Image (cartoon, rainbow, N blue to C red):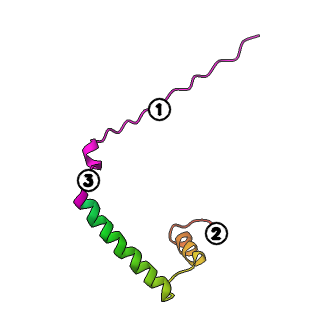
Amino acid sequence: MSKPKKHSITKKTNLVQEPPIEYKSEFVLDHEISQLLEKLIKKGIEQCEKGETTSHEVVMSRIKQKFNLPL
């Protein structure tokens, strides 16, 4: 009778090496993004208050049709 083979688990490594400098930003850029994000959030709140929204069901229906997903 033969013994079952032991399986070894190997750790996968990330093969894509990206320079870390790409992810660093200065305070000025963060501040600009914060101002833009604040404006977008305020605009979204105003749209909600005016009733300019789309229901979840309608959005999902459109996505399913656009990407030919099963209903």
Q: Nearer the viewer, residue 46 or 7?
A: 46
Residue 38 position in % (x across, y down): 36, 72
* Residue under pointer 1: 12
Q: CA distance from mark 1 to mark 2?
A: 36 Å
Which residue type does callout 3 highlight? Ser
Residue 14 position in % (x across, y down): 40, 36
Which residue type does callout 2 highlight? Leu
Q: CA distance from mark 1 to mark 3?
A: 29 Å
Residue 56 position in % (x across, y down): 58, 75
In the displayed structure image, the side of residue 45 where residue 31 appears, left or right: left
Quarter that holds the N terminus: top right
- Name the quadrant containing residue 20: top left
Q: How many marks?
A: 3
Q: Nearer the viewer, mark 3 or mark 2?
A: 3
Which residue type does callout 1 highlight? Lys
Marker disc for residue 25: 3
